[in-house]
Image (cartoon, grey):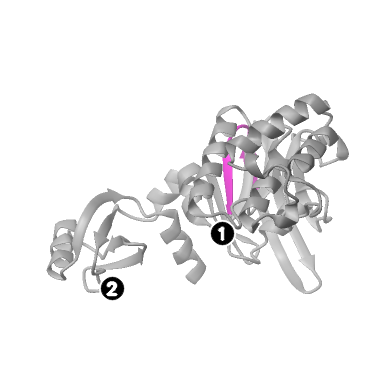
Amino acid sequence: MANYSIHIKNFSKSFGDLKAVDNLSFDVNEGEIFAFLGANGSGKTTTIRCLLKIYQPDEGELLINNSEYNEDFNNLIGYLPEERGLYRDVSVLDILVYTAVLRNIKKEEALSRSIEYLKKVDLYDHRDKEIAKLSSGMQQKVQLGTALIHEPEILILDEPFKGLDPVNRQLFVDILIERAKNGTTILYSTHVIDEAQKMADTLLIIKNGKSLEYGNVEKVREKYGSKNIIIDFVGKAPEKDNRLYSAIISNKRAEISPKSNIDSNEIIKNILNQGVKIVDMTLDYPSLNQIFIELMKK
């Protein structure tokens, strides 16, 4: 039998005349990080909700550890919903302890785990504040804590980086990678593509409920062309498109895709002649961000 934690086969779901998900199939293997990528409204949340029986699927097979979801899985799974649902008049520490106790963790252990988590995510000094008095980013950290606190075997996270600044996004990338190394299976949905390239083993890109790309992250990147030129620059930005290349430019970084039969040395010379000051340069396969943008345009 296949060594998967989550198995979805020929899954479809409609809401009236809207086909939210159309014949979707994928597996999430034990202990891997699986990135479920798509723009808002692509069908990610609908798939997760049907997997967890919040919605009923129209067709298909949706299994967790070879069984359909049931209440016995509550302690096995950590779930972060798209809509946040914290009690706003409860303190940070109390909500984490309460959540852990609900998962059959003794109160003393629940308190210890909650304090450890709050220190790790730099919220310990805010432990006695009511949720309503926290910033949205802090609330997101607490919400993530409620999914992580019982150390589940499977994490299902719907837009886990929502509201987090770059520093805290990296913090949670590191936390999730650490969990996966210790055997946790992680399925997370996002439209923030950069993190997926850093942390995911496998990806699925969907648009309008249909699969556009599925597989190992590095193999998907190799599939989309020869190596790109990635430069960091200061001052003037390079042209976005000319006879030699096309580029995606953001935050003083340009990812440059050579046009057919164009040598990379010719491109670098062209960019320097534009007056661009290059401070760093690497060659790599197209980024997930570029692949995602191209697929969304088609």
Q: Main secondary structure of the magenta part?
A: strand
Disc 1, SS: loop
Q: What residue is at 58 percent from the left and 36 percent from the top?
A: 120
Residue 54 shows which numbered tag? none
Residue 191 shows which numbered tag? 1
The residue under label 1 is which amino acid type?
His
Quarter of the figure with residue 272: bottom left
Q: Above or below — where is 173 with respect to 267?
A: above
Residue 34 on the magenta segment: yes
Q: What residue is at 68 percent from the left and 41 percent from the top?
A: 145
Along the viewing direction, whichever of 52 and 26 lies nearer the viewer: 52
Residue 241 shows which numbered tag? 2
Q: Position of residue 38 (x, y in %)?
A: 58, 60
Image quadrant holding the N terminus, namely top right
The residue under label 2 is which amino acid type?
Asp
Marks 1 and 2 in Cβ contact (< 8 Å): no
Quarter of the figure with residue 115: top right
Q: Which residues are magenta?
A: 25-36
Disc 2, SS: loop
Q: Position of residue 232 (x, y in %)?
A: 27, 56
Instruction: Tell me how far mark 1 sits from mark 2, CA to CA.
Output: 25 Å
Q: Position of residue 238 (x, y in %)?
A: 24, 69
Along the viewing direction, whichever of 108 and 22 lies nearer the viewer: 108
